[in-house]
Image (cartoon, rainbow, N blue to C red):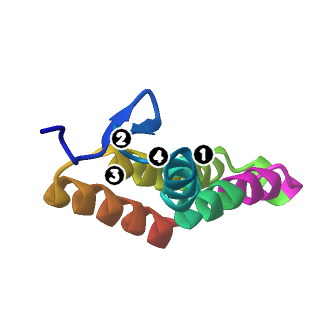
Amino acid sequence: MPSRRWKIAAGRFEAPEASPSTISHLQSSIMMTFEDLESWQRARALVRKIYELTRLDELCRDFGIRGQLQRAAVSIMSNIAEGFERMHLPEKLQFYNVARGSTAEV
């Protein structure tokens, strides 16, 4: 008897008994990468804004605060991405908590 489990190979679903329309519908309704997460997209927009603001004269001259703000903003985005890729819930939560801490820093 064939397996009724979905298999993910090379970023797409494979199912021996599923119709192409079913597979297409599932692919469009399931997040495939961390870039699909709204939180990661918002973190990316924050990084862009932080870099834009740190180019202003007031912050541009203060290398310490400028670098710290930039690193913290990038950390948010990076930890969301890394947490998304983890398979075990405690690991996911750890990375998401670090991202949350970085938001407080910014």
Residue contact between numbered discs 4 and 3, judged by CB atoms under 8 Å: no
**x then y, percent, for residue 27:** 52, 51
What's the CA distance linking mark 2 and mark 3?
28 Å
Q: State which quarter of the image contains the N terminus.
A: top left
Q: Looking at this view, is 105 or 86 the one in front?
A: 86
What's the CA distance linking mark 4 and mark 2?
33 Å
Q: Residue at x 47, y 46 (%)?
A: 78
What's the CA distance linking mark 3 and mark 1?
24 Å
User: Circle 3 sits on which residue?
Assistant: 83
What's the CA distance linking mark 4 and mark 3?
9 Å
**x then y, percent, for residue 75:** 47, 50
* Magenta region includes residue 34: no
Residue contact between numbered discs 4 and 2, judged by CB atoms under 8 Å: no
User: Circle 1 sits on which residue?
Assistant: 67
Q: Looking at this view, is 3 or 94 the one in front?
A: 3
Element under label 2?
A: loop
Mark 4 or 1 closer to N-term? 1
Q: Which residues, given as a range, are shown in magenta?
A: 47-57
* Magenta region includes residue 50: yes
Q: Nearer the viewer, mark 2 or mark 3?
A: 2
Mark 3 or 1 closer to N-term? 1
User: Circle 4 sits on which residue?
Assistant: 78
The circle on residue 15 is 2
Element under label 4?
A: helix
What's the CA distance linking mark 2 and mark 1?
48 Å
Packing grade of label 2 (10 A; few <14, some 14-19, many >=20) is some
Q: Nearer the viewer, mark 4 or mark 2?
A: 2
Q: Residue at x 56, y 57 (%)?
A: 25
Residue 82: name its quadrant: top left
Q: Amino acid at mark 3?
A: Gly
